[in-house]
Amino acid sequence: MGLRPLPGLTGLGSGAMQAVRRSRGAARAGADGAADVLQPLVVVGRGLRRLAYDGRAWWEAAPQERRGPVGALVFVGVLGVYLLPYGPALAVGALLVVAGWKGRGGGVAEAPAETGPGPEELARLQSLYEALVPCFARADEPGEEPLYAHDGTYERSFEEFSFTGEGRVERLLLRYPAHFADCDAEQRQRVERVLDAKAGRGREYRFGWDEERNRLELSVLPPLPADVVAQPFVTSPGETVLGFTDEGAVPRTLPVTDGWGSRDVPPVVWRTGPRSTEPHLLVLGNPGSGASTLLRSVAVQALRHGDVLVVEGGGAGEFAFLTGRPGVPAVESSVVGALAALEWVVHETERRLLTGHRARQAGDPVPADVRRPLWVVVDRPALLSHLARAEGRRDPQELLEVPLRHGRAAHVTVVVAEQFEGAQALAQAVRAYTRARVVLGPESADQVRAVLGEGPAAAPAPQPPRGRGYARLGGGPVLRLQVPATPDPHDEETDEAQRQAVLALLPERGRPAGAARAAAQAAGPPPAGPVAAGR
């Protein structure tokens, strides 16, 4: 059965059909012309809709405390534009230009594609929230909807968050209830341990506690530069670079040369001398953590402007490369030699004090040999004390009390390094007068707090590289630290580039001390080349 023709068209003649076709063509041509004329208005309208969508999305995602200031700022801006001559006209013109730029390009979709967290990220946020419920929830918490409850969701307390490309938490800003004891170190450490475990191990996190606003911010820390080798750092006399830390943690940077060129890095600078509030340094760490590396770095830097006496309790010969160098009175590793060297330090400290006192009484300047810094570097004194007691000799740590007590006035600086297993055997004078302290190695937050007096703001890395730890100078903040690679140049396993970098900083044997210091100050940075972290 064939299809019937549409009524109303079958009865038309050929002339009528041509007239209909002409009218349809004219209508299409008119519509195309109108579309061309109205195209700018369509683009501007599309841009205005997109701007409105973006503004609404930002307003909904912004926290409450940001909406008020932004609204006030917008009101002030609108009022200022209204009061300016031709202000409203210029504002409308600028808005039309921005809308035209925003609405360029075709497409019917007025809203951008959704870029929020996916199902896996949402599940990770909910898991974090549920893990924090036992830390923050309280049965008698006032309010109908507490921030943390067993049947709650993360939207109640997580204000801002972001993820890495692998779907791991990169930053998280959360609210916690006002009743939480954020002044208690144990309670804060409990929360930090939970976040460290749930956000993903193997990374270092910084925890920023805002007690005034009841906010906690978790952020992933970038790795510290572990490829910086020993070199002549740009410092003033009395300044020693202990290592390098995070950007923004200190108010200065230093130019350094690594295997890929020059760059500026933030240093941890320790200031010594008569005006220093932290004239002596204590370094604690486990075997292989880099304590001897830090002592070698300090000794090499101290030779630029002073004399260095080394007492090595371990007996491994890691400071033998300093023997016979100008500005190095002695490098001792035996009990007898250590006692003799430290007794000389006691007499030298007393001589400096008496000479300086007489010069000031007479109104004369202090002699140069008194003002020249003397550094006493002691590695593993607890082992030396044990050997001295076994031989029935005097404890070498007793001889450190005089330079520790009066070293600041006599320009004598004491640097002590010990392992954690021998920390209990340190003398009371060593503990009392070493206010600049460094902890190296994968230590727990409790160990760091016991040594530095304050816990770190960042969770310790589970397997840090050699020379990684924390430093605190007196009552200052706890800083992450990476010690510059300063290996023993006599070690056969030392990288050749690092060996040459350390040897270039040492004064040559047999040269006068003044000429050696001038050569060390004039020495340039080590040759560029790929280097590994030092021993």
Image: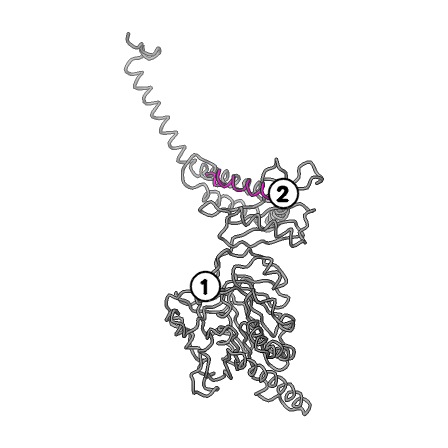
The magenta span reads 113-135
Q: Is residue 116 magenta?
A: yes
- Quadrant position of the N terminus in the picture: top left
Q: Nearer the viewer, residue 535 or 470?
A: 535
Q: Is residue 387 magenta?
A: no
Secondary structure beneath label 2: helix
- Quadrant housing residue 515: bottom left
Percent position of residue 328, x then y: 50, 82
Judging by the rendered image, the residue that carries numbered circle 2 is 134
Identify the residue shown where x is 44% and y is 79%: 506
Percent position of residue 39, x then y: 42, 37
Secondary structure beneath label 1: loop
- 72 vs 20: above or below: below
Eye-nearest disc, 2 or 1: 2
Q: Nearer the viewer, residue 418 or 72?
A: 418
- 492 vs 349: above or below: above
Looking at the image, the residue that sits furthest to the front is 391
Amino acid type, label 1: Ala
Percent position of residue 45, x then y: 48, 37
Q: Is residue 209 left or right of residue 161?
A: right
Q: Is residue 208 visible?
A: yes
Label 2 vs label 1: CA separation?
38 Å
Q: Is residue 528 left or right of residue 422?
A: left
For residue 226, which numbered disc appears in the image? 1
